[in-house]
Amino acid sequence: MLLDASLLRRYEEELVVLRDKAHKLLCELGGDGEYLAMLQHMVDAASQMRLEPMPNNSTPGGSAGQNE
């Protein structure tokens, strides 16, 4: 299942690694401090974990496969 808690933990760990790499690259590139701070903020916002694990008793898709 794609929304399994253990899979989402691994995905979140990968997000942290990518976020850290992006911050490191931005620091290496340098540039205007004001823009650097804004870009780092954008990286943080884009790398937030937005998925949540699905409860064990839920069925993905709700009424999928049922005729209405």
Image (cartoon, grey):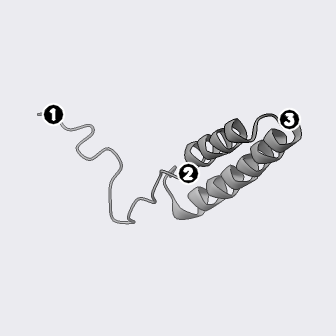
**Separation of marks 3 and 1 at Cα, in angstroms:** 56 Å
Give the crowd class for mark 1: few <14, some 14-19, many >=20 residues within 10 Å: few
Name the residue at 46% across, 60% down. Answer: 53
Res 12 → quadrant: bottom right
Could you tell whether 30 is left or right of 2 in the image? Answer: right
x then y, percent, for residue 33:
74, 41
The residue wearing badge 1 is: 67
Residue extending furthest left? 68
Res 48 label:
2
Give the crowd class for mark 2: few <14, some 14-19, many >=20 residues within 10 Å: few
Residue type at the position of mark 2: Gln
Name the residue at 32% across, 59% down. Answer: 58
Name the residue at 15% across, 33% down. Answer: 67
Viewer-proximal residue among 52 and 54: 52
The residue wearing badge 3 is: 29
Q: Residue 32, relative to residue 50: is it above or below?
A: above
x then y, percent, for residue 24:
83, 47
Could you tell whether 12 is left or right of 60 in the image? Answer: right
**Separation of marks 2 and 3 at Cα, in angstroms:** 23 Å
Q: Residue 8, relative to residue 36: is it above or below?
A: below
Viewer-proximal residue among 61 and 43: 43
For label 2, the SS is loop
Label 3 vs label 1, nearer the camera: 3
Mark 1 or mark 3, which is nearer the start of the sequence? 3
Mark 1 or mark 2, which is nearer the start of the sequence? 2
Residue type at the position of mark 3: Leu
Mark 3 or mark 2, which is nearer the start of the sequence? 3
For label 3, the SS is helix
Could you tell whether 49 is left or right of 13 in the image? Answer: left
Give the crowd class for mark 3: few <14, some 14-19, many >=20 residues within 10 Å: few
Could you tell whether 52 is left or right of 36 in the image? Answer: left
